[in-house]
């Protein structure tokens, strides 16, 4: 939480800048807010409130070292509890948990009756993996300031992450009643509804993500596609989120083509060749600075809202991605040298250091390879690494007893990954883009899902309406992978034994 600078003795121009910076912060336009606070500090360099507010905006942008510096400056200038609270949150998000804990304790000791301080303490407890204490802080914030929409938002988000979706929906709707334009509350409400399987209402609320997240913006908003027949017009569907989201929602390109559209996808280069296999896709481009001519555009994920997707109307055609048949056969020939079932393994996501929320989520979804040690002792299977990114180095030193074959140095893009996946019997993955790839290819895939599961896996369901071949193995409690890993090990052991018995017969 940030505290506004006082107006006493300030000229009209400065007061106007303070007000505008505050409005930008509330609207999620944190870059504009940070720029304004920076200009204000040039006028009033010794204001701890302005340094504190600048730190809050910088933290929201993910500029954690700058945020820590600004908040430290605020405390040095005599900052009150809010400054220590903001410093603690920036330190926590940067991974300095001990320093963060000390800062929050200091803030709470000075001002325990501050709803903002309680909110930040709750956010800290969530980061450190203590959801019960986080909820307690947010409830205290709501008690202290029942009209504070952000306190209700934080409580609702925590309930959503705790898989208490009905409670979350009630709290988030109250936040929206207090502040109808609070975009983040709408977004979390959307994710809660989506997790409950209420897709039509959920996707409608999820459209609010576009008001507070740094998604790409097309130069001409007036040309956004509003639905209806395209009748030969060209539509540009652009990708705004991670690779998994693109692989999940590229199926909607076929829907756009079915109403007469010539479909162009804007997507990262590593997906280009694979996305050209989606039925109805005419062209895939990867440079947002050089777009081909088009008549209208839309974020790819917004297609789900545009067509009113429900559980029973998810585009059903699987596979909608296709691996090159010759490449698949070549991989099958190579893998035939390995014994038993061929099982692909992904144990870690991408850190995404440029996105603080994604980075925090990645800590909760990823595992070290060593946690999969038991899979290496299962007879009748061969493990094949599908891991990319920094964690791929772990494949060079697998845990004791595990034989892990690694071809990923030969893999240049997702089309090549698809060919390797197409030659496997099963993929076991944490919640990453490879899980979506396998599901879209119609390949059996088992997903290890964190307790605060992504909405797309729905709650308390082992299956997926998005991918019929996918099975979810969820954490029973935050941070508790043991039961999920034991279940995967048990099920894979039974499957391998069944396959071996079938071969013997």
Image: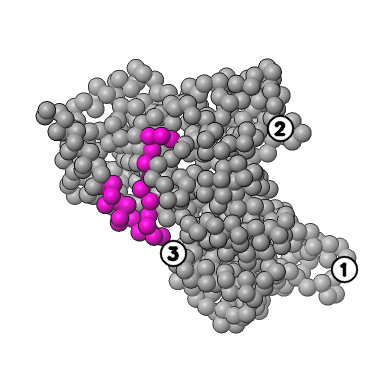
Residue located at (42% from left, 23% from top): 322
How many neighbours does mark 1 have within 10 angstroms: few (below 14), some (14-19), or many (20 or more)? few
Camera-side residue of 292 and 470: 470
- For label 2, the SS is loop
Q: Give whichever of discs 1 and 2 has the lower sequence position.
A: 1
Q: Which mark is residue 129?
A: 3
Residue located at (52% from left, 72% from top): 136
**Residue corresponding to mark 1:** 11
Q: Provide residue 271's location: percent of width, then percent of height.
A: 49, 30
Residue located at (48% from left, 57% from top): 163
170 shown above or below 292: below
The residue range painted magenta reads: 467-489
Camera-side residue of 32 and 446: 446
Q: From this viewpoint, which residue is outermost toward the front?
A: 312
Q: Quadrant of residue 86?
A: bottom right
Q: Give whichever of discs 3 and 2 has the lower sequence position.
A: 3
Mark 1 and mark 3 in contact (Cβ < 8 Å)?
no
Horizontal side of 209 relative to 451 (left or right) equals right
386 shown above or below 14: above
Q: Is residue 487 magenta?
A: yes
**Residue corresponding to mark 2:** 226
Q: Quadrant of residue 402?
A: top left
Horizontal side of 436 relative to 423 (left or right) equals right
Whole-number angstrom distance, CA of label 3 to CA of label 2: 42 Å
Q: Is residue 316 magenta?
A: no
- For label 3, the SS is loop
Q: Which one is closest to the eye, mark 1 or mark 2? A: 2
């Amino acid at each position: 939480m940030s505290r506004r600078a006082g107006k006493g003795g300030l000229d009209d121009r400065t007061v106007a800048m303070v007000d505008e910076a505050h409005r930008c912060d509330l609207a999620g336009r944190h870059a504009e807010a940070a720029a304004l606070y920076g200009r204000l500090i040039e006028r009033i360099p010794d204001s701890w409130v302005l340094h504190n507010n600048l730190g809050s905006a910088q933290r929201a942008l993910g500029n954690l070292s700058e945020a820590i510096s600004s908040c430290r400056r605020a405390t040095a200038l005599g900052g009150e509890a809010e400054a220590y609270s903001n410093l603690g949150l920036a330190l926590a998000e940067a991974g300095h948990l001990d320093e963060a804990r000390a800062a929050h304790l200091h803030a709470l000791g000075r001002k325990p009756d501050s709803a903002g301080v309680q909110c930040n303490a709750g956010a800290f407890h969530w980061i450190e993996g203590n959801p019960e204490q986080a909820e307690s802080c947010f409830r205290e914030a709501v008690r202290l300031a029942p009209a504070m929409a952000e306190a209700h938002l934080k409580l609702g988000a925590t309930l959503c992450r705790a898989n208490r979706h009905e409670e979350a929906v009630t709290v988030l709707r109250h936040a929206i009643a207090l502040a109808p334009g609070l975009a983040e509350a709408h977004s979390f409400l959307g994710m809660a509804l989506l997790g409950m399987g209420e897709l039509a209402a959920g996707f409608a609320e999820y459209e609010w993500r576009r008001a507070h997240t740094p998604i790409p913006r097309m130069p001409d908003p007036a040309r956004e596609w509003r639905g209806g027949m395209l009748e030969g017009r060209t539509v540009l569907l652009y990708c705004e989120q991670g690779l998994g989201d693109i692989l999940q929602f590229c199926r909607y390109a076929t829907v756009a083509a079915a109403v007469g559209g010539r479909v162009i996808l804007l997507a990262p280069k590593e997906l280009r060749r694979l996305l050209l296999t989606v039925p109805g896709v005419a062209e895939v481009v990867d440079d947002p600075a050089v777009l081909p001519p088009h008549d209208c555009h839309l974020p790819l994920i917004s297609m789900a809202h545009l067509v009113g997707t429900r559980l029973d109307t998810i585009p059903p055609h699987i596979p909608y991605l296709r691996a090159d048949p010759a490449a698949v056969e070549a991989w099958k020939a190579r893998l035939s040298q390995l014994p038993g079932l061929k099982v692909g393994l992904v144990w870690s996501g991408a850190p995404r250091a440029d996105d603080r929320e994604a980075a925090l989520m990645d800590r909760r979804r990823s595992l070290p390879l060593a946690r999969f040690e038991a899979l290496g002792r299962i007879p009748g299977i061969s493990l094949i690494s599908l891991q990319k990114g920094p964690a791929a180095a772990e494949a060079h030193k697998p845990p004791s007893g595990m034989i892990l074959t690694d071809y990923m140095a030969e893999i240049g893009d997702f089309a090549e990954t698809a060919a390797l996946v197409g030659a496997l019997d099963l993929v076991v993955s944490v919640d990453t883009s490879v899980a979506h790839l396998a599901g879209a290819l119609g390949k059996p895939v088992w997903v290890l899902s964190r307790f605060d599961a992504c909405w797309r896996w729905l709650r308390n369901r082992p299956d997926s309406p998005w991918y019929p071949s996918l099975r979810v193995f969820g954490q029973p409690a935050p941070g508790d992978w043991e039961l999920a890993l034991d279940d995967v090990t048990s099920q894979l052991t039974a499957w391998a034994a069944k396959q071996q018995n079938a071969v013997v017969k």
